[in-house]
Image: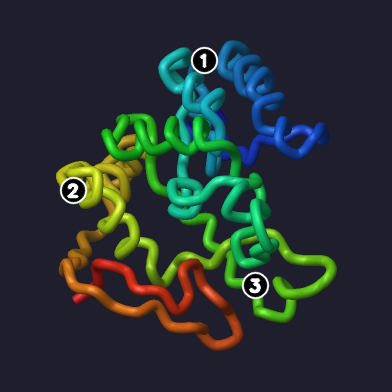
Amino acid sequence: MSDLDIPLCVHGETNGFVMDREKEFCSVYESLAIAFPNLKIIMEHITTADSVALLDKYPNLYATITLHHLYITLDDVAGGMLQPHLFCKPIAKTYKDRDSLLQVALNAHPKIMFGSDSAPHPQHTKECSGCAAGVFTAPIALQMLAQLFDKHNKLENLQKFVSDNAREIYNIKPSEKNIILLKEEIQVPEKYGTVISFNAGKMIGWKIV
């Protein structure tokens, strides 16, 4: 893979305690980065401050971050009544972890890119005794990212986070596509078919024209 310039994309978790699994996997990322210095390694949908810290430690480590992990913590999932539509893997972590993710995302750290990890599980597989892991964000991802970056006065970095950084990291030149976002309130549908999305039924501040 190093010789062919093929990236290694990894959802890195151990079999340990659920809140520690990603942190424990950091040592595996480090051993891979050291053993294969020419291998581009993508830490997929990171959720911890520990993973963020690795970005500046090893030149061949990169990462994706989801929309929902920039918004929620474990409190939102299980701090009150259980919210099955926010249950995902890696599980949402602490406020400190979310703040670390926000810091690198909002500032468009060159080794960070958006990765939706959007999971359209039907309602009956989420609202059941064996709840499927995953959050459905695809229909409102760009709108809610625009809302988040606007809230923090970082709109100028949105393009880098959702597109430019990934083009550089993967060294690709996809065909051009323009998406126009307008700052206007819309209500997220209660359902998309049989799937309930992130922020279903709520108002968000941006829409796609």
Whichever of callouts 2 and 3 sits on the residue coming sooner in the sequence is 3
State whether residue 15 is above or below residue 139. Answer: above
Give 81 or 207, whichever is nearer the viewer.
81
Sort mark 1 into few (<14), some (14-19) or many (20+) by Cα contacts within 10 Å: some
Q: What element carries label 3?
A: loop
Give 43 or 86, whichever is nearer the viewer.
86
Sort mark 3 into few (<14), some (14-19) or many (20+) by Cα contacts within 10 Å: some
Residue drawn at x 65%, y 46% is 91
Looking at the image, do the residues carrying marks 2 and 1 touch, with CB atoms under 8 Å apart?
no
Residue drawn at x 18%, y 48% is 155
Q: Check disc 1 and report the residue beneath it.
A: 37
Sort mark 2 into few (<14), some (14-19) or many (20+) by Cα contacts within 10 Å: some
Whichever of callouts 1 and 3 sits on the residue coming sooner in the sequence is 1
Q: Check disc 3 and report the residue beneath it.
A: 121
Front disc: 1 or 3: 3
State whether residue 137 is above or below residue 65. Answer: below
Q: What residue type is labelled 1?
A: Pro
Q: In this orientation, does residue 13 appear? A: yes
Q: In which quarter of the image is the C terminus?
A: bottom left
Give 60 or 124, whichever is nearer the viewer.
124
Which mark, residue 123? none
Q: In which quarter of the image is the N terminus?
A: top right
Residue drawn at x 40%, y 47% is 114
Res 144 → quadrant: bottom left
Q: Is mark 2 on a helix, strand or loop?
A: helix
Colour mapping? rainbow
Q: Which amino acid does label 2 sit on?
A: Leu
Give 45 or 166, whichever is nearer the viewer.
45
Q: Check disc 2 and report the residue beneath it.
A: 155
